[in-house]
Amino acid sequence: MGTSSIYNGPKDKNPLLPEGFEEEYDPNQQENADNQEPSETSLDFPWQATKKSMSQFINGRSQNRGRIARNYVRALGGATNAAKSAKAAKSSTIQLGKFLSDIITEGIEKTLSKLEIEFHGKSVESLFSELVNVVAGNSNSKEDIAAKNASMEALSELYEFLVENAMDIRHLEKMDANLINKVMKTFVNSYLIERLLKDLQSRFEKYADDLSIAVAKENEVKEYITESVAVKLDQVRFNNLDYRSKNIDQIVEGIYRDCYEVLEAYI
């Protein structure tokens, strides 16, 4: 996972920071980081604190996944700002919701036609590849990429449904509320994970020499986020949302805000 030129992720903007301040982890420190209260420095420089908590987790000096998530949301400016800045996520959530609701009300063929996706003579794999681009759009930033990866995870739920139904894409017209909610929850959950991991990728490149360790640590972080936001996402009836209403953007932003509030609330 090593690289000769590592992008160290977002930084706290303060011209008074000395050279090397972002190098957050001293391997010789003897303090038990898990028992430390947030210092004045960690509150003033949330990205530095976030990177420190992730680095310590990767190194095995801490098992505190909750602190990583809390510090990360704080570094994004808190739950409200984190949700506001999740522009690609909100757009993709709405696009995915429109796609699913249109299939139910108008059928798969008309829905794909509206999206200018040729339906006939294409494999399911080819159609799904095009759908990812429709749902997520361009990948010009890390946040865009996080949304695109989340789209692939969400659409994989539909793909598995088709595998169980002889790969006949018309079976999507028989989706029930449970499947729609599962697909939408998968997207939101996957985005929350992907965004964090994209912003903190350099910690893995810098401190995880063993690929298997890196994968295991990533999975632990993913598991924590999934378990933390599960209750909030289970409360949302995605199948009942009107994805063409004039206030849908605010509704979707509220869903992300609620999830980020859960992650930020760790004590």
Image (spheres, rainbow, N blue to C red):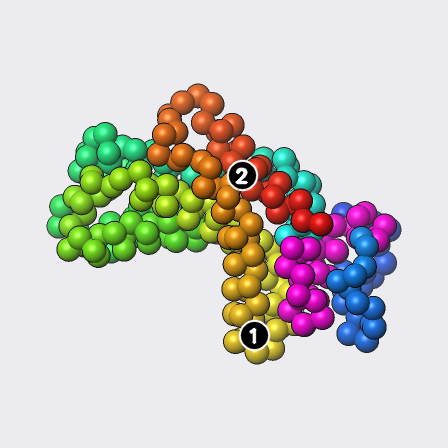
Identity of the residue drawn at 84% across and 53% down = 39
Magenta segment boundaries in residue numbering: 39-68
Foreground residue, 34 or 171?
34
Identity of the residue drawn at 16% across and 44% down = 170
Residue 117 shown in magenta: no
Mark 1: which secondary structure? helix
Q: Position of residue 202 (x, y in %)?
A: 62, 64
Main SS class of the magenta portion in the image: helix
Foreground residue, 118 or 256?
256
For badge 1, the amino acid type reads Ile
Q: Is residue 173 left or right of residue 208?
A: left
Which mark is first along the chain, 1 or 2? 1
Identity of the residue drawn at 22% across and 52% down = 162
Q: Is residue 242 left or right of residue 265?
A: left
Q: Determine crowd level at label 2: few under 14, some 14-19, many 20+ residues with C-alpha closer than 10 A.
A: many
The residue that disc 1 covers is 213
Residue 56 shown in magenta: yes
Q: Residue 23 sits in which quadrant? A: bottom right
Q: Determine crowd level at label 1: few under 14, some 14-19, many 20+ residues with C-alpha closer than 10 A.
A: some
Which residue sits furthest bottom?
210
Which residue sits furthest top?
246
Q: Position of residue 132 (x, y in %)?
A: 35, 48
The residue that disc 2 covers is 256
Mark 2: which secondary structure? helix
Which residue sits furthest left?
121
